[in-house]
């Protein structure tokens, strides 16, 4: 069962991202498009990191760290494409920069929330495995 959970980390993280995207679309349906894009930029990476790490059977903080790196690399690629090609939001570079910044904040926030949730088990693990002098 644990092996299956390890295999499902990345699909679960992507599923969390998609569910967050649908939720943002439904919540911001009657708001300006800019609000929808910026809310999505924050919420989807947050859901990616949190849900992906929740599926892991152990080492959830470490898994959240790996998912954070994956998301930050993806956001870096997105930022490069969006700003260099003028693709995002009709060429609005300030909005694209704010969206990437919100994405980074959402990703790091997800890592921090996972750490806060798993902190007690992580500290117990470190105490148990310390070398005694």
Image (cartoon, grey):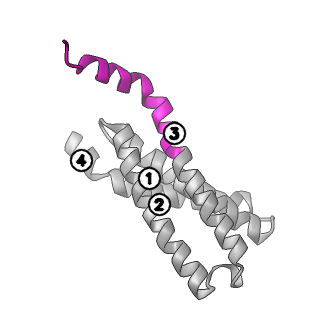
Q: Earlier in the sequence, mark 3 or mark 2?
A: 2
Q: Secondary structure at mark 3?
A: helix
* Residue at which label 1 appears: 68
Residue 60 coordinates in the image, percent (x, y): 36, 38
Q: CA distance from mark 4 to mark 3?
A: 26 Å
Q: Is residue 114 above or below residue 96?
A: above
| The label number, if any, that marks residue 112 in the structure image | 3
Residue 13 coordinates in the image, percent (x, y): 42, 54
Q: CA distance from mark 4 to mark 2?
A: 26 Å
Does the magenta stretch mainly form a helix, a strand or a loop? Answer: helix
Q: Residue furthest top?
A: 133
> What residue appears at the point 53 percent right and 80 percent down from the top-left corner?
81
* Residue at which label 2 appears: 72
| The label number, if any, that marks residue 50 in the structure image | none
Which residues are the magenta region? 110-133
Residue 52 coordinates in the image, percent (x, y): 41, 48
Query: Where's the C terminus, which quadrant?
Result: top left
Q: Secondary structure at mark 2?
A: helix
The answer to whether the residues at label 1 and label 3 have Cβ atoms under 8 Å apart is: no
Q: Viewed as shown, does residue 123 lie left or right of 110?
A: left
> What residue appears at the point 46 percent right and 35 percent down from the top-left corner?
115
Q: Residue furthest bottom?
A: 85
Instruction: Residue 30: name its quadrant.
Output: bottom right
In-front residue for pair 29/128? 128
Q: Earlier in the sequence, mark 1 or mark 4?
A: 4
* Residue at which label 4 appears: 4
């Amino acid at each position: 069962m644990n092996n299956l959970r390890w295999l499902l980390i990345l699909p679960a993280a992507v599923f969390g991202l998609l569910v967050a995207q649908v939720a943002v679309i439904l919540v911001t349906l009657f708001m300006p498009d800019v609000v929808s894009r910026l809310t999505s930029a924050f919420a989807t990476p947050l859901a990616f990191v949190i849900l992906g790490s929740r599926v892991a059977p152990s080492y959830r903080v470490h898994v959240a760290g790996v998912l954070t790196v994956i998301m930050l690399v993806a956001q870096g690629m997105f930022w490069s494409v969006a700003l260099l090609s003028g693709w995002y939001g009709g060429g609005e570079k300030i909005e694209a920069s704010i969206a990437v910044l919100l994405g980074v904040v959402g990703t790091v926030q997800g890592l921090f929330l996972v750490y806060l949730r798993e902190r007690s088990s992580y500290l117990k693990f470190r105490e148990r495995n310390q070398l005694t002098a």
